[in-house]
Amino acid sequence: MKRPNRWLRDGALMIEYGIHLDAYHFQDRIWKFNLRDNWFNVCQKLDIKLENDDGLELFCSKKILRFHSKYFASKFRPSDRRFYLKELPLNTSFQVDYTDSVLQIGHGVRLSFSDVDHSDIIEIVRTAEKLKFRNVSRYCEQQMIVLSGTSYYDDFLTMAIRHNLNHYVAHVLRMNESMKIIREEDIQHMSRNTMILIMSKFMKNSF
């Protein structure tokens, strides 16, 4: 039974209020969510804080995490007691900037990679794959195709093979780029679709 005076404290009405920065943008004019500060939300059960011992501390919506990530969907089942956790520790391999970028894209922000170093794109994809944000990996793959260049072609192709980004592999094959950089360990990571793409290209060029 609910108390009739549950909104009162010592006979006085208690009002909770605050100011929170929901989103921001810099010179690129791309609005981003403020995931670095705890959300002002009276229904705190729906939020989660991701943290590790390396300084990572990001606040997100459980609903969005569960919808886009198989990893978080397995963590936050309503029937599981962990669904009501307010904090989820991650290991120190998750760097705050890369994890923030993954969550931004996962929340629908279309980040521009035109001024981003190619090694950072690779790390964002690796982080997305560890958290099983497949839609984030696919978005990065689109950006890789747009930014495709000889200076980082080898690194992108290796990552595409390892994480089954077959659209980028198909893009490389359409460009008639050499596949000699593929190493034996990369072949072991190839998905069936990637093997079919490469074999189809090889057979086509053999006749």
Image (cartoon, helix red, strand yellow):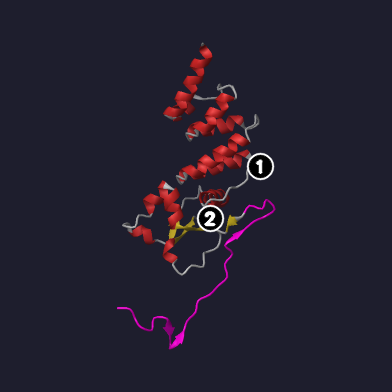
Task: Report the predominant secondary structure element of the magenta stretch.
Answer: loop
The residue under label 2 is: 56
Count of numbered badges drawn on the protein: 2
Mark 1 and mark 2 lie on one chain; the one further toward the N terminus is: 2
Q: Is residue 46 left or right of residue 24?
A: left
Q: Amino acid at mark 2?
A: Leu
Magenta span of residues? 1-30
Residue occupying the point 45% across, 30% down? 189
The residue under label 1 is: 114
The answer to if 168 sits in the magenta stretch is no
Q: Is residue 12 above or below residue 200?
A: below
Near-viewer residue (188 or 206): 206
Q: Position of residue 120 (x, y in %)?
A: 60, 42
Q: Is residue 78 left or right of residue 125?
A: left
Q: Is residue 125 above or below residue 44?
A: above
Q: CA distance from mark 1 to mark 2?
A: 25 Å
The answer to if 7 sits in the magenta stretch is yes
Q: Secondary structure at mark 1?
A: loop
Q: Position of residue 73 (x, y in %)?
A: 39, 50
The N terminus lies in quadrant: bottom left
**Between marks 1 and 2 in the image, the one whose residue lies nearer the viewer:** 1
Q: Kindly indicate whether the residue at mark 2 contacts the one at mark 1 (C-beta within 8 angstroms).
A: no
Residue furthest out toward the top: 207
Q: Position of residue 37 (x, y in %)?
A: 55, 63
Numbered mark located on residue 46 in the image: none
Q: Amino acid at mark 1?
A: Ser
Residue occupying the point 47% across, 58% down? 61
